[in-house]
Amino acid sequence: MSHRFDVIVVGAGMVGAAFACLLARRASGLTVAVIDGRMPPPFDGEGDYRPRVSAVSRASGRVLEACGAWTRIAGSRISPYQRMCVWDAGHDLEQPGTIRFDAVDLGESELGHILENDLIQQALVDQLRSLAEVRLICPASATAIGAGGDRVIVDLDDGTSLRGHLIVGADGAGSATRRLAGIGTRGHAYDQTALVCHVTTERPHHETAWQRFLPDGPVALLPLADGRSSVVWSTLPDTADSLVKAETDVFLDALTTATDGVLGRITGTGDRFTFPLRLQMAETYISRRLALIGDAAHTVHPLAGQGVNLGFLDAAALAEVIIDAHAAGRDYGEHAVLRRYERWRRGENTAAAYGIDAIGRLFRRPEAVVGTLRRAGVALVDGVPVIKNLIVRRAMGLSGDLPRFARPPEARERSA
Ligand SMILES: Cc1cc2nc3c(=O)[nH]c(=O)nc-3n(C[C@H](O)[C@H](O)[C@H](O)COP(=O)(O)OP(=O)(O)OC[C@H]3O[C@@H](n4cnc5c(N)ncnc54)[C@H](O)[C@@H]3O)c2cc1C
């Protein structure tokens, strides 16, 4: 049996679901199939926080608004953060060499929000379910894909097929779509694993995201609305393994030391989880009638909290080029349209991924002279508001070549 749609999206994670929402809400008449192998359990805003959270930029917030999902998210639980403070283990927080960002200095109400990944995905999936143009097919996985003429076909593991004009691979770092399309990847595994958990602390977090660079990797405390902080501790794989298995008291002491007691003692922890880390870039983002977005196209180190933010910009950029081509009566799956998306996003994502990689390497250099130069460089940036604001505005998605769904509404209307 086969079903017809215009666009077939593989993966209803945060990025694939956002892309499908944008397309179905903003392109007149395009039908969208979204397939996913599994959904997280329904999100319960009264239950405990889910383990995985993301620091979501202002630009991503606007993409979620354009998807029609922000009201649902804001009506549940969101943790705004006003400040960010980054320093390295070679010196005290109060000495020069610490960099601080404050929303007040930028005239913004916050730097961004800490949101649970499952909350974002649930809000987007609820929105997808309310759109007549969308069919969410779950559980289902793609087993084969093909393209010929102006058509594509996706075979599913339940024996059915989907026909359309474009396939979008949003199926994460291990993307089957990317593999089935024969697209290779470049990159390397980091000699690091991220340990994540939510902790209680002796002192309040003051809506500040704290990140301390240790020789084995950074440890971050991200503020949650209930007063706890979410930990992302990137460290050597063996160390992460021991920390996840350690007795609670041993772990709490180790984390208190790693964070230099910035929030006093770490007094309690929820369940601990680990994620191996890698830098991975798809060799191309497009193939015949196919485009990759989100982690299927690029996977970056979490130290700058940029992974899903880059993915949301991919979703917004691809939706924009398709919507514009469709409105102009063009074939939105043709190479020239997809190439416009690739030219727009690949350079940006590659620069971000290797920039983040370089920061991680710089902070892992143990030599005293490198440490001195590093602190001098950080102090210089911290002391020159123009440079500092340029950096943070870029990370927040307040500057750069933003897709229109990521711009403030007034700028969006002007460019539409
Ligand atoms: C420890 C850690 C902390 C992070 N912190 C941040 C942060 O603060 N800020 C930030 O911006 N980013 C952060 N990231 C990165 C962020 O989590 C990812 O970039 C994001 O989850 C990618 O979303 P995605 O939708 O592209 O892929 P995924 O979240 O991997 O979703 C892919 C979807 O595709 C489905 N799927 C997979 N294979 C198939 C198939 N064959 N058929 C059908 N469906 C399939 C899956 O079920 C899933 O729903 C962090 C990452 C880590 C590891």
Image (cartoon, grey):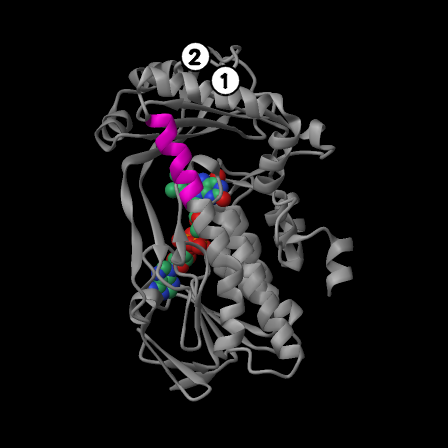
In the image, residue 390 sits, relative to residue 385, either above or below, namely below
Give the alpha-carbon distance from disc 2 to disc 1, as whole Å: 8 Å
Q: Which residues are magenta?
A: 354-364
**Within the image, what quadrant is residue 387 found in?**
top right
Dot 1: element: loop
Q: Magenta region's main secondary structure?
A: helix
Instruction: Provide the residue designation for mark 2.
Output: 91
Q: Tell me, yes or no, whether the highlighted magenta stretch contains residue 84.
A: no
- Tell which circle, 2 or 1, labels the residue nearer the N-terminal end: 2
Question: Does 125 sit left or right of 177 as displayed?
Answer: right
Q: Tell me, yes or no, whether the highlighted magenta stretch contains residue 363.
A: yes
Question: Does 123 sit left or right of 136 as displayed?
Answer: right
Instruction: Provide the residue designation for mark 1.
Output: 97
Q: Quadrant of the C terminus?
A: bottom right
Q: Quadrant of the N terminus?
A: bottom left
Asked if labels 1 and 2 touch by Cβ distance under 8 angstroms, the answer is yes
- The answer to which of 99 and 265 lies nearer the viewer is 99
Residue 128 visible in the current orientation: no
